[in-house]
Image: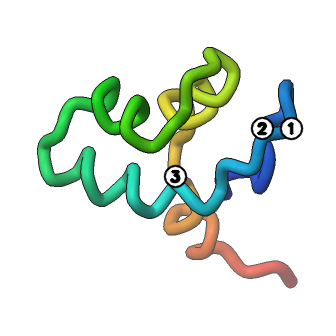
Amino acid sequence: MIIPIRCTSCGKPIAHLWEDFKKRTAAGEDACKVLDELGLERYCCRAIFLGHVDLIQEVSKFKKF
């Protein structure tokens, strides 16, 4: 739902890169090229970005009673 602050495998801080990645891929840039330019070289960090599904808008529709 929310991108983790650090990579769960290696511990590298990655959350600050998420907004830039999301903007650039939405604009049509290749995800592989964007990840390379952001400095994400390890497979574990790349997998978090490529496998992340942003569900915060879906979850925020429901209230907790």
Image quadrant containing the C terminus: bottom right
Residue 55 place in picture, x, y as percent:
55, 55
Which kind of residue does numbered mark 2 sit on?
Answer: Cys
Q: Is residue 50 above or below residue 52?
A: above
The residue lying furthest to the left in this view is 28
- Dot 1 or dot 3: first in sequence order is 1
Which residue corresponds to mark 3? 54
Name the residue: 37% across, 38% down.
37
- The residue lying toward the viewer, choosing from 5 and 56, is 5
Q: Is residue 8 above or below residue 25?
A: above
Q: Nearer the viewer, mark 1 or mark 3?
A: 1
Which residue corresponds to mark 2? 7
Q: Secondary structure at mark 3?
A: loop
- The residue lying toward the viewer, choosing from 52 and 14, is 14
Name the residue: 60% across, 62% down.
16
The residue lying furthest to the top in this view is 43
Q: Secondary structure at mark 2?
A: loop
Bin the neighbour count of mark 2 within 10 Å (Cα to Cα): few under 14, some 14-19, many 20 and up: some
Q: Is residue 59 above or below residue 21?
A: below
- Dot 3 or dot 2: first in sequence order is 2
Which residue corresponds to mark 1? 11
Which kind of residue does numbered mark 3 sit on?
Answer: Asp
